[in-house]
Image (cartoon, rainbow, N blue to C red):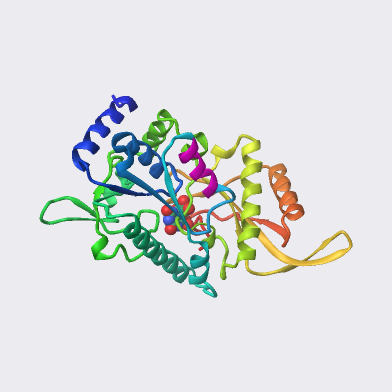
Amino acid sequence: TWTTEAFVEESIREIRAKVGDKRVLLALSGGVDSSTLAFLLHKAIGDQLTCMFIDQGFMRKDEPETLVEIFRDQFHIPVVHVKARDRFLAIIDGITDPEEKRKRIGHEFIRVFEEESKRLGPFDYLAQGTLYPDVIESADTNVDPQTGERVAVKIKSHHNVGGLPKDLRFKLVEPLRKLFKDEVRKLGRSIGLPEEIVQRHPFPGPGLAIRILGEVTDERLDILREADFIVRQEIKERGIYHDFWQAFAVLLPIRSVGVMGDQRTYAYPIVLRLVSSEDGMTADWSRVSYDLLEAISNRIVNEVRGVNRVVYDVTSKPPGTIEWE
Ligand code: XMP
């Protein structure tokens, strides 16, 4: 039977044997996989590990700071916090096509990753939070024909990006490759990861940028970040966060008329997207109470400047996707 203690011990042995005295780079995303991986590697090789967190400016409210703080202060794992918001905003300035937006963000991510890894490196290994299902799909790796070793060609959190430049094809360390998601959660918990990371809903690599339809601006990001925060706060306070696969807000780049006090408003609508799912491949819109919808709607319209309407998405997947872009 699988115990976390035995797994941790065995992984540490394996990591040390593989890595020796070489340096390892880990791109921390804030999710449970890369966070658990950081813990495991830090336990195994200490300061031979460099954790890099690329902050695109598309994370949720307080998330980057919380992540870096938890690692630095609570667990004494230093994290290089790369603040790259301006260049990410610039690279998608005026871009409205979803695929183009994703592509540009993905490519910029690779560019930043490349620059920073050269600045901080050299590194021999890249650690990735590849799980068993990813190994089966084998989408983000190649096998080196000479050594038989798996080599990184993509960054896991960015599905549809070309890939890493040739001179950056690190050898891989993938200690989670035999695990399923629920085992990673168990493991994360056992080594002391806070529940907010262990149980975090899935969050796409391009972040809030693909939850603002069309053009992404500073103003729209601020609005969406606040609305998203309210959604999460309301469901967490009701103790129903785990009833959902994902629960989030989407900003539509149109305006409609409303009234506030005796003032006419002309502002953005927010879409609520609350879904249940087993694996993200199919999903059902969640049958939530009117009370919840009312509470979220009232708070968003009253507290978030620039929003005057909240609508609920009642589309399942298929035919809808979970994200709107
Ligand atoms: P869709 O929108 O295709 O999403 O129904 C299915 C699941 O995948 C997540 N998703 C992503 N995750 N990088 C990620 O790591 C991405 O670029 C990305 N795009 C979508 C989505 O949140 C949902 O859980």
Q: What x and y, as percent, mark residue 149?
A: 17, 50
Point out the image quarter for the N terminus: top left
Q: How many marks?
A: 0
Q: Residue furthest right?
A: 262
* Residue 222 shown in magenta: no
Residue ID at (60%, 37%): 240
Name which quarter of the figure residue 290 lies in: top right
Image quadrant assignment for residue 270 = bottom right
Does any portion of residue 318 appear in the rendered image? no
Q: Is residue 169 left or right of residue 238?
A: left
Residue 135 horizontal side relative to residue 51, left or right: left
Up-down: is 57 above or below 91? above
Given residues 149 and 90, the one toward you in this image is: 90
107 sits to left or right of 286: left
Residue at 34% over, 59% down: 119
Indicate the position of residue 248 as horizontal and vertical percent values.
58, 51
Please indicate, yes or no, whether residue 298 appears anywhere in the rendered image.
yes
Q: Is residue 311 above or below residue 182?
A: below
Could you tell me residue 231's position as x and y percent?
64, 47
Look at the image and give the residue range highlighted in magenta: 64-73
Q: Residue at x 64, y 65 (%)?
A: 219
Q: Main secondary structure of the magenta part?
A: helix
